[in-house]
Image: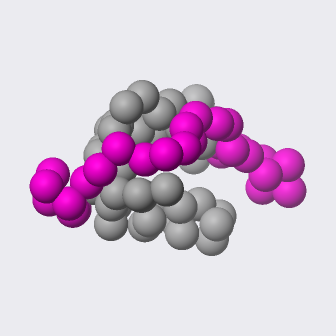
Amino acid sequence: MNSLRIVLAAFAAAALLPAAAQVKPAHDYTDLWWNPDEPGWGLGLTHQGSIILVALFIYDIEGAPRRVGVSMGVCDTG
């Protein structure tokens, strides 16, 4: 779960940048991420233009599926 915290911290930091500092990246970051050694969560990224939508797929303590989503500007210049 430590890798999940690192990914979420990186996205939170990028979301705090002012819009003027964000530029259109040269790469498409759309992908699905999961670790078979850490079952119970996954991360989906959808990249369009200068926006990335992040969807976190998790299970709550009772085993019910949950989704958490956020969108943010991209600050990578390529």
Q: In the figure, 54 relative to 37: above or below?
A: above
Q: In the figure, 27 relative to 11: above or below?
A: above
Point out the image quarter for the N terminus: bottom right
In this image, 71 relative to 45: left or right?
A: left
* Residue beneath the point at 36% across and 49% down: 74
* Residue beneath the point at 43% across and 47% down: 25
Q: Count the marks.
A: 0
Residue 77, quarter of the rendered image: bottom left
User: Is any part of residue 1 visible from this angle?
Assistant: yes
In this image, 58 relative to 73: left or right?
A: right
Q: Nearer the viewer, residue 71 or 40?
A: 71
Q: Main secondary structure of the magenta part?
A: loop
Residue 15, quarter of the rendered image: bottom left
Instruction: Please say whether residue 44 is one of the residues in the magenta stretch.
Output: no
Q: Nearer the viewer, residue 64 or 39?
A: 39
Residue at the extreme right: 37
Span highlighted in magenta in the image: 16-42
Q: In the figure, 39 relative to 2: above or below?
A: above
* Residue beneath the point at 41% across and 39% down: 52
Q: Where is residue 76 drawn, in percent x and y? A: 42, 58
In this image, 12 relative to 40: left or right?
A: left
In this image, 57 relative to 55: left or right?
A: right
* Residue beneath the point at 13% across and 55% down: 20
User: Is any part of residue 67 visible from this angle?
Assistant: no
Q: Where is residue 61 drawn, in percent x and y? A: 57, 46
Instruction: Please say whether residue 25 is one of the residues in the magenta stretch.
Output: yes
Q: Nearer the viewer, residue 74 or 2?
A: 74
Protein image colouring: one colour
Q: Where is residue 18 drawn, in percent x and y? A: 14, 59
